[in-house]
């Protein structure tokens, strides 16, 4: 599943092509993804966008009268191509620009979304989201307060959007390794000094992944069609049975909250 760095990479890749480009046509080739594709998206025809923003794992494509809200889901990808290029299988949503380019949303598993948010309105799925992890709002005091009543595993807690947005399975495992915290540790039992290390680790691992262009895992590709490169540098995720880079112990795998978690039993406690 594309995580925050992949979505941020997608945003940065799309911006030079779609901002200030006049929309010529909107084509819906398959009506239903996770939810039905909003017919209101056709209202952007003839217009230029104002801004492309990322909130959590959502891309918000702003126009004067409203916003196209897009989510990559489990296997979604966006690419910029010539409008004359034949459609690929699973190209479900397409925006054609006056300059002859096209934005295409491809989603084999159809868990993605293309929704519409009218001006001065808010979609329920965007309400009650926690802070962005790379902002000052996400800090040790905030995290300690947010976890004070949570008895779930710390990994599950930091993957909860109401606590902090965009920390998915890959980067949660990596951040917990850097912070030296086992993923199954009880969230409200983790001390403040250790939470401080975790906050720093989350910021570090996400910033590095954004710089590297996301991960190469499974379905993610950048808007230029190239894979990201961060997966080559993962410390624990997907490495069960292999040696830890720090201590030579064996990386372990444990299912927590129906998600595979990876950790070093020696380096993390």
Image: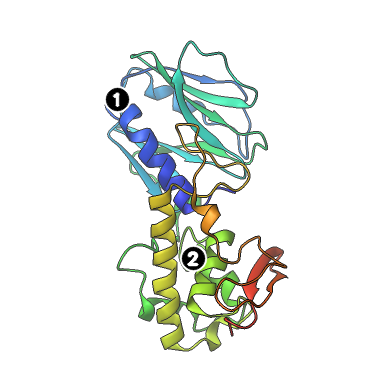
Tell which of 142 and 120 is nearer to you. Answer: 142
Which quadrant is home to the C terminus? bottom right
- Mark 1 — residue? 48
Q: Indicate the secondary structure of the residue bearing disc 2.
A: loop
**Image check: 11 left or right of 178?**
left
- At horizontal 38% and vertical 51% (from top left) the residue drawn is 211
Q: Is residue 258 left or right of residue 86?
A: right
Secondary structure at numbered mark 1: loop
Query: Which of the 4 quarters of the picture holds residue 73?
Result: top right
Q: Is residue 235 left or right of residue 241?
A: left
Quarter of the image where one finds residue 60: top left
Q: Is residue 218 or residue 244 the one in the foreground?
A: 244
- Residue at horizontal 65 percent and vertical 36 percent from the top: 110
The residue that appears at 35% across and 44% down in the rendered structure is 53
Establish if 155 lies above or below 54: below
Mark 1 closeness class: few <14, some 14–19, many ≥20 residues within 10 Å: some
**Position in image of residue 203 (x %, y %):** 39, 66
Locate residue 170, reporting x and y percent.
57, 60
- The residue under label 2 is 162
Residue appearing at x 49%, y 48% in the figure = 229
Whichever of callouts 1 and 2 sits on the residue coming sooner in the sequence is: 1
* Image location (x, y in percent) of residue 157: 55, 72
């Amino acid at each position: 599943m594309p995580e925050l760095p992949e979505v941020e990479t997608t945003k940065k890749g799309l911006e030079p092509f779609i901002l200030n480009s006049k929309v010529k046509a909107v084509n819906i080739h398959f009506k239903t993804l996770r939810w039905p594709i909003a017919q209101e998206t056709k209202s952007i025809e003839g217009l230029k966008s104002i801004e492309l923003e990322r909130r959590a794992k959502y891309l918000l494509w702003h126009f004067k009268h409203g916003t196209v809200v897009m989510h990559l889901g489990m296997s979604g990808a966006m690419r910029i191509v010539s409008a004359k290029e034949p459609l690929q299988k699973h190209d479900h949503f397409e925006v054609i620009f006056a300059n002859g380019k096209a934005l295409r949303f491809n989603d084999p598993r159809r868990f993605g979304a293309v929704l519409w948010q009218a001006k001065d309105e808010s979609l329920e799925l965007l309400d009650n989201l926690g802070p962005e992890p790379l902002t000052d709002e996400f800090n040790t005091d905030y995290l300690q307060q947010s976890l004070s009543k949570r008895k779930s595993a710390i990994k599950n807690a930091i993957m909860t959007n109401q606590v902090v947005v965009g920390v998915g399975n890959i980067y949660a495992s990596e951040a917990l390794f850097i912070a030296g915290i086992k993923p199954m540790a009880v969230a409200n039992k983790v001390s403040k000094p250790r939470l401080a290390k975790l906050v720093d680790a989350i910021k570090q691992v996400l910033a590095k992944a954004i710089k590297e262009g996301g991960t190469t895992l499974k379905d993610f590709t950048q808007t230029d069609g190239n894979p990201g490169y961060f997966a080559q540098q993962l410390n624990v995720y997907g490495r069960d049975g292999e040696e830890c880079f720090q201590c030579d112990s064996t990386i372990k795998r444990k299912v927590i909250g129906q998600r595979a978690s990876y950790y070093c039993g020696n380096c993390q406690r």
